[in-house]
Amino acid sequence: MDDAHTVVWNRPERAAKGPAPSRTRAEITAAAIAIADAEGIEALSMRRVAKELGTGTASLYRYLASKDDLLDLMLDAVVAEDGGLPAPTGDWRGDLRTLAHRSRATIHRHPWMASIAAGRPSLGPNSLDATEHALAALDPLGFDIDVMITVVDTLHAFVRGYAIGELAQQEAVRRSGVGIQQWMDAHAPYLDKVVKAGRHPLLARVIRDAELPHAADGAERGFQLGLERLLDGWEANLPIRP
Amino acid sequence: MDDAHTVVWNRPERAAKGPAPSRTRAEITAAAIAIADAEGIEALSMRRVAKELGTGTASLYRYLASKDDLLDLMLDAVVAEDGGLPAPTGDWRGDLRTLAHRSRATIHRHPWMASIAAGRPSLGPNSLDATEHALAALDPLGFDIDVMITVVDTLHAFVRGYAIGELAQQEAVRRSGVGIQQWMDAHAPYLDKVVKAGRHPLLARVIRDAELPHAADGAERGFQLGLERLLDGWEANLPIRP
DNA sequence: GCACTACTGCGAACAGTGAGCGCAGTAGCG
DNA sequence: CGCTACTGCGCTCACTGTTCGCAGTAGTGC
């Protein structure tokens, strides 16, 4: 199969000779995404994808060197799914805020992203576009290039990390196969014990008195709050304009 | 097996009757961590752990309901590994900074953490201790409890997200099984093409002119920089003290 | 027009996975 | 002293990612 030194992003879609392939990588990627969305990432197997497409499993390896490549393609496909990137408006805070919210929304739509993305550099064309776009929003501020990439990385880190935390419980419940209520019932005795033991007074206060964790839009509001403080931090350190 | 409603954190280590178990959950967890550290998370199988401990595979299921439980235990074990948490000093910035750096160091020591942690709420005793500790550092500031937990969540999100980004390439190289040089050689043609195409001028500037990405301690310095800005954001929004 | 070549689809197989069954053996309670 | 509830574990099941080899086909050079 193909050159081991060939990276998935650099593979020609069609060979020079021989019969035309009956499928495209995009088709395969879309099928895989549909499966992961509907049945969870652990249900995603090459056989399952092949069945979805009505083809033999081995055929997929004419398009992809490995399942790893498929995961790379899935990640990059999903980054671009909600239309083109909005043009920079000149309001850097607003632009970065928009990007952060879009990014969070994407992860929410595809919760499997978080687990897949760890250990996988985002070098796909759509990911590169997104990074370029974020840099462009910062361009007029006069930061030097090292700071600019740090801002983008930090924002990206916050969004990814926050979404992972948000989805952790939801995913655990889904994987367990029982309903949210049964999952909670299973965990309640342990958490009760922790709170009653009294060695976590502040955590107990969070559980008892905090509003955000119990509100339906608590995670959303926490995200907004954290994001604004992050932006505040950079705003307080803008370079002195000449 | 056992009660499906019993959560791993709440399972008694030893049964009331019958022969004493010949191993402990801690032993099994330690063996699993050693394997994941040395051979990567994808080499971690129940058979591999059993071999390491010199037992039968099925025996492990007397201690753990599933491999999922083992992963939970591994994550929580690793959180506590570098000694007890330092006592709050009264300097909230310093305390949070220390926690963030410790957390980052832990992920670097165990790169598999990042991929495992997604989709897994951190409810283990050591994770709860760490959260309580972070809340304690913030306690004197006079934030209300909702803001306090948001600060902790945001910090946690940043650290996790940043470390994931840092480790992405390193892990991809490791998984590919070739050296860093060969990996780079394989990707160079694609990245060259992207830069030459000219549609990512800022990204090109990062690759050409930025210092941080090429410096040995670049990731470390980027982390510090991002962390300070994050702390700045909260410092700029301290509640007015009565 | 025709061989040659480089491709495509894919059935079958391989080594390895998480997990469950059922059995032999054992510790402690009554 | 038995009865019971446990422990360790060989064997097995259904499934995984991936490869081999083979039949069939599209385009190139003559």
Image (spheres, coloured by chain):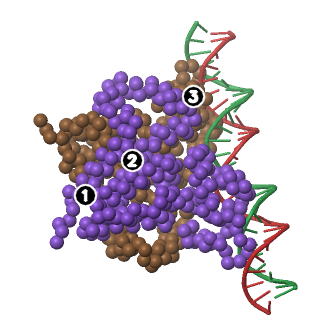
Chain colours: A purple, B brown, C green, D red
Quick check: B49 left or right of B156?
Answer: right
Q: Label 3 is placed on what type of residue?
A: Ala
Position of A124 with respect to B85 (left or right) is right
Q: Secondary structure at mark 1?
A: helix
Separation of marks 1 and 3 at Cα, in angstroms: 48 Å
Of badges 3 and 2, nearer the viewer stands 2
Q: Which residue is mark 2?
A: A162
Label 2 sits on a secondary structure element that is helix
Q: Is residue A236 left or right of residue A59?
A: left
| Residue A97 % position (x, y) | 34, 55
Instruction: Tell me the CA gap for discs 1 and 2.
Output: 19 Å
Q: Is residue A84 visible?
A: yes
Task: Mark 1 and mark 3 in contact? Answer it, CB < 8 Å.
Answer: no
Give the CA separation, mark 3 to mark 2: 30 Å
Vertical side of A23 occupied by B195: above or below: below
Closer to the chain start, of discs 1 and 2, is 2
Q: Which residue is mark 3?
A: B4
The chain identifier of the residue carrying mark 3 reads B
Residue A6: x %, y % from top left:
58, 71
Residue corresponding to mark 1: A234
**Label 3 environment density (alpha carbons within 10 Å; few <14, some 14–19, many ≥20):** few
In this view, the residue in front, B144 or B166, is B144
Q: Chain of mark 1?
A: A
Question: Which residue is more in the foreground, B184 or B5?
Answer: B5
Element marked by disc 3? loop
Q: Residue at x 42, y 47 (%)?
A: A163
Image location of residue B168, percent across then percent down: 45, 59
Q: Residues within 10 Å of mark 1 (few under 14, many from 20)?
A: some
Nearer to us of marks 1 and 3 is 1
